[in-house]
Image (tube, helix red, strand yellow):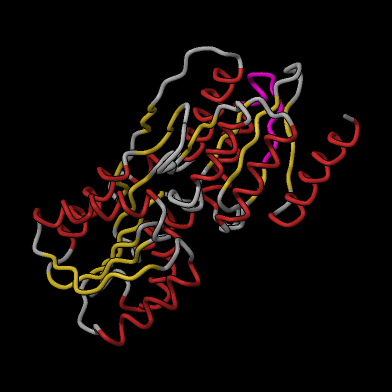
């Protein structure tokens, strides 16, 4: 028995070392520890989600252990498996890839540990609760706003191909195209990453120099696109992002981004932990929790400044 305990601890240590450092916050919750497996902390949006989760854990008197998958779906599965061997009472997962998160869901189910998905869904497997923004609605709102700002050819910078947020925002964007005079002439993944957004946008501009607009599935890619556009951003090319991060709000104020679809990552993190704690205590949980999204423009920017 002692050997198995050491092995479990070693497995967790290896997972945290290989997949990103783990941090534990909160306390006073008896034996309740919640694990949060986050896709990446190299993005201010997910940092805000983590901070919301930490605040909820502190208020509820439970411990929260956070690990960073660094956008590696395999690492994230290892992290969730390590959580189950450590004996956490529930796991919150923000999937790197919704399809590739299935083994993590299976590991949690086999260990009898409730799993809560936040911001992105898990395609297959048992999930106690899904806490997400309405990404389809957000994509539609983005298309409507871009159509108001410009007419003509636009490009679409997509997120990680397997992520539910990518699929849903893309689906909503396609639905919203009917409301304006814009046409998508190129779509390409840039993996929710600012540097990749810059590179992909640079290449797309060479093939499509006459574009009038850009929709990016998140603000990081939108900001990369703005850098690639240079002086054209906000003048003859309008950019719409998604998330409502501080840098994006500044870009809206500066006029280089016409709009962003604001999520509430801190609220997502808070509600995910609340559902995880209920599941850990054997209480009823809400199977689907929707968090509102809103379009941010210069006209209502002040509402989103904190």
- The x and y percentages for residue 155 are 26, 70
Indicate left or right for 233 with 41 as reference: left
> Image quarter for residue 31?
top right
Q: Does the magenta stretch include residue 59?
A: yes
Choose between 258 and 41: the one closer to the eye: 41
- Residue 162 screen position, x and y as percent: 41, 56
Question: Image height check: is 58 above or below 140?
Answer: above
Left or right for 17, reference 256: right
Picture residue at 41% right of the left edge, 58% below the top: 219
If the image is split into quadrants, where does the N terminus sit? Answer: top right
Q: Foreground: 151 or 157?
A: 157
Q: Seen from this angle, which residue lies furthest top?
A: 283
Residue at 64%, 50% (x, y): give it.
68
139 to 146, vertically: above or below: above
Residue 105 x %, y %: 53, 38
In the image, the segment drawn in magenta is: 57-66
Q: Nearer the viewer, residue 25 or 229?
A: 25
Task: Pinpoint residue 192: horizontal percent, then vertical percent.
Answer: 45, 61
| Residue drawn at x 54%, y 45% as measured from the top left | 103
Q: Is residue 13 above or below residue 239?
A: above
x 32%, y 44%: residue: 135
Q: Is residue 172 above or below residue 271?
A: below
């Amino acid at each position: 028995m002692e050997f198995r305990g050491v092995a479990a601890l070693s497995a967790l240590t290896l997972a945290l070392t290989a997949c990103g450092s783990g941090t534990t916050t909160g306390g006073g919750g008896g034996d309740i520890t919640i694990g949060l497996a986050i896709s990446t902390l190299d993005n201010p949006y997910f940092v805000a989600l983590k901070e919301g989760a930490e605040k909820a854990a502190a208020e509820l008197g439970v411990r929260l252990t956070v690990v960073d998958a660094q956008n590696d779906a395999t690492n994230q599965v290892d992290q969730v498996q390590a959580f189950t061997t450590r004996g956490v009472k529930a796991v919150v997962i923000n999937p790197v890839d919704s399809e590739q998160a299935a083994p993590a869901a299976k590991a949690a189910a086999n260990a009898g540990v409730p799993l809560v998905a936040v911001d992105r869904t898990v395609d297959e497997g048992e999930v106690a609760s899904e806490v997400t923004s309405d990404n389809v609605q957000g994509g539609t709102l983005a298309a409507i706003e871009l159509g108001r700002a410009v007419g003509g050819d636009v490009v679409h910078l997509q997120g990680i191909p397997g992520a539910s947020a990518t699929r849903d925002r893309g689906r909503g964007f396609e639905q919203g195209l009917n409301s304006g005079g814009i046409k998508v002439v190129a779509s390409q993944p840039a993996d929710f990453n600012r540097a990749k957004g810059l590179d992909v946008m640079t290449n797309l501009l060479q093939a499509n120099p006459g574009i009038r607009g850009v929709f990016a599935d998140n603000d990081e890619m939108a900001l990369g696109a703005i850098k690639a556009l240079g002086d054209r951003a906000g003048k003859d090319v309008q950019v719409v992002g998604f998330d409502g991060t501080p840098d994006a709000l500044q870009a809206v104020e500066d006029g280089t981004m016409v709009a962003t679809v604001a999520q509430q990552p801190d609220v997502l993190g808070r509600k995910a932990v609340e559902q995880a704690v209920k599941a850990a205590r054997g209480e009823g949980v809400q199977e689907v929790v929707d968090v509102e999204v809103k379009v941010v423009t210069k006209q209502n920017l002040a509402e989103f400044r904190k």
